[in-house]
């Protein structure tokens, strides 16, 4: 299938024998952009895909946040100030005496408090597992975005390839119509045809020029879309090839693979796991909490007679919730409803994948059949045009018959170009619907983004604000 592209089967994209010469030159791989190269650029540079990668890295931070529940919390406190004291004290004796103390002090205090949670109703391990499930769901969502980006890149590439070929067809059609008009005017001057024939040729030429303008506008829009998805201005594009070999051979097998392994389905499965763990986290609020608190305190000049004081303590604190207004029960009910929603979302994801596979399979089969039909249409239109021209020379056909046959041939070739584009895009669409549209399956020569690298960089970090690049 190598080299299979829009120019195969449409040699002579316009009516002249050299019609495809310019297109073939533009399609030489040695001087052109390739579909594989464009996919590589989209995979590396597409901002939507890079934004989703950043979202996954942000989700990774949920795991160390959950793990922090296992770790102690340490705080430092300190104070310093200036204080003036003037006190008069009476002694409690039979002969009363009075003592007066006055003076300035600089009281200061430093201390460290450490708190370690020993038990909190299993909330910390459940939060950790929930965060890990959310990380896995985010990775699967990233795979969905990768597939969408690659499919958009294929679509943009093949659309531009198609629109470039159609624009070339329409331009060469105008050239033929101009020649047709010149010949008709010459025949009118010698009295072989009427003014009506000249007007018909002029009308068809004006329509052809209008079609060129429309094709140019479509081509420019495709260039802009290519630039948006791929990230660079397009060069000369080489033909693209289908990827049927990477998809299951039957529709039933495709449905089985897709509903089991498609990233949209696996992401929904991890979301169900996260919702189930959220129920356990909410139920943990009903359990008692046990914590150990240690405190070390050093004070200076707390009074005129006390120059220094040191205190140290270790306290075990047990908290048993009895009733807290009912909010914790509401959170549990809410989490259970969310769990039910996530399970329904999983069913919805499977149904959507199945529908996408059936639709993509039908489109691919239709595209294959459409190529054969349009190739036959082009061949028949070419024979018909040649016959009508010969009959017109001997007076059995009119100029309008020739113009109609010419337009039918152009329409058939445009349909063939579109069918070949649909053939390639449909094969990638099926691969995406199954869940296999990835750089690894396509064999793209590009470093594959590994989300696990950043996860391992941050999972067990106790402190620090540096952001790893995740590569």
Image (cartoon, rainbow, N blue to C red):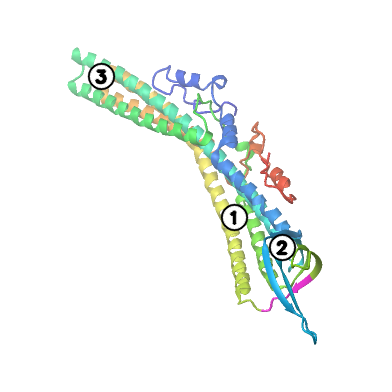
Q: x and y percent of residue 35 in the render?
A: 56, 30
Where is mark 2, residue-wise? 107
Q: x and y percent of residue 253 in the render?
A: 64, 48
Depicted 318 relative to depicted 428: above or below: below
Where is mark 1, residue-wise? 350
Report crowding for label 2: few under 14, some 14 to 19, many 20 or more residues within 10 A (C-alpha).
Answer: some
Mark 3 touches mark 2? (CB < 8 Å) = no
Where is mark 3, residue-wise? 395
Q: Is residue 274 left or right of residue 420?
A: right
Locate the N terminus and report the quarter of the image it occupies. top right
Q: Is residue 396 left or right of residue 217?
A: left
N-term-proximal mark, 3 vs 2: 2
Q: Give the mark toward the camera: 1 or 3.
A: 1
In terms of depth relative to the viewer, which is nearer, 451 or 341?
451
Instruction: Determine whether the residue tagged by mark 1 lies in a helix, strand or loop.
Output: helix
Residues shaded magenta: 316-322
Q: Give the mark toward the camera: 3 or 2.
A: 2
Depicted 304 relative to depicted 375: above or below: below
């Amino acid at each position: 299938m190598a080299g299979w592209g829009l120019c195969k089967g449409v040699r002579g994209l316009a009516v002249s024998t050299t019609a495809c010469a310019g297109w073939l030159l533009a399609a030489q791989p040695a001087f052109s952009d390739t579909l594989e190269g464009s996919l590589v650029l989209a995979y590396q540079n597409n901002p939507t895909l890079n934004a989703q990668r950043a979202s996954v890295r942000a989700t990774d931070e949920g795991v160390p946040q959950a793990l922090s529940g296992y770790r102690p919390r340490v705080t430092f406190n300190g104070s310093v100030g200036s204080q003036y004291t003037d006190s008069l004290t009476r002694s409690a004796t039979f002969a009363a005496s009075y003592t007066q103390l006055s003076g300035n002090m600089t009281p200061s205090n430093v201390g460290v408090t450490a708190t370690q949670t020993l038990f909190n109703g299993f909330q910390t391990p459940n939060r950790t597992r929930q965060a890990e499930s959310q990380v896995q769901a985010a990775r699967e969502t990233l795979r969905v975005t990768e597939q969408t980006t690659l499919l958009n890149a294929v679509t943009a590439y093949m659309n531009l390839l198609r629109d470039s070929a159609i624009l070339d067809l329409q331009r060469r059609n105008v050239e033929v119509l101009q020649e047709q008009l010149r010949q008709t005017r010459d025949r009118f001057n010698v009295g072989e045809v009427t003014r009506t024939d000249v007007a018909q040729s002029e009308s068809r030429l004006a329509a052809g020029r209008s079609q060129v303008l429309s094709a140019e506008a479509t081509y420019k829009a495709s260039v802009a879309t290519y630039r948006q998805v791929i990230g660079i201005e397009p060069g000369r594009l080489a033909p693209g090839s289908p990827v049927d070999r990477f998809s299951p051979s039957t529709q039933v097998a495709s449905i089985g693979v897709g509903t089991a392994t498609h990233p949209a389905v696996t992401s929904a499965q991890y979301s169900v796991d996260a919702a189930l763990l959220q129920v356990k986290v909410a139920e943990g609020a009903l359990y008692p909490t046990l914590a150990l608190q240690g405190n070390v305190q050093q004070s200076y000049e707390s009074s005129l007679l006390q120059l220094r004081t040191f205190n140290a303590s270790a306290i075990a604190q047990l908290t048993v919730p009895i009733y807290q207004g009912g909010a914790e029960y509401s959170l549990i009910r809410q989490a259970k409803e969310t769990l039910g929603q996530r399970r329904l979302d999983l069913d919805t994801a499977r149904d959507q994948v199945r529908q996408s596979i059936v639709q993509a399979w039908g489109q691919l089969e239709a595209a294959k059949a459409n190529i054969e039909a349009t190739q036959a249409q082009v061949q028949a239109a070419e024979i018909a045009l040649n016959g009508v021209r010969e009959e017109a020379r001997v007076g059995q056909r009119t100029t309008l018959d020739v113009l109609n046959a010419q337009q039918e041939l152009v329409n058939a070739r445009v349909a063939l170009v579109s069918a070949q584009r649909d053939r390639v895009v449909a094969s990638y669409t099926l691969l995406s619907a199954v869940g296999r549209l990835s750089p690894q399956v396509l064999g793209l020569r590009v470093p594959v983004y590994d989300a696990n690298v950043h996860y391992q960089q941050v999972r067990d970090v106790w402190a620090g604000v540096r952001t790893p690049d995740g590569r």
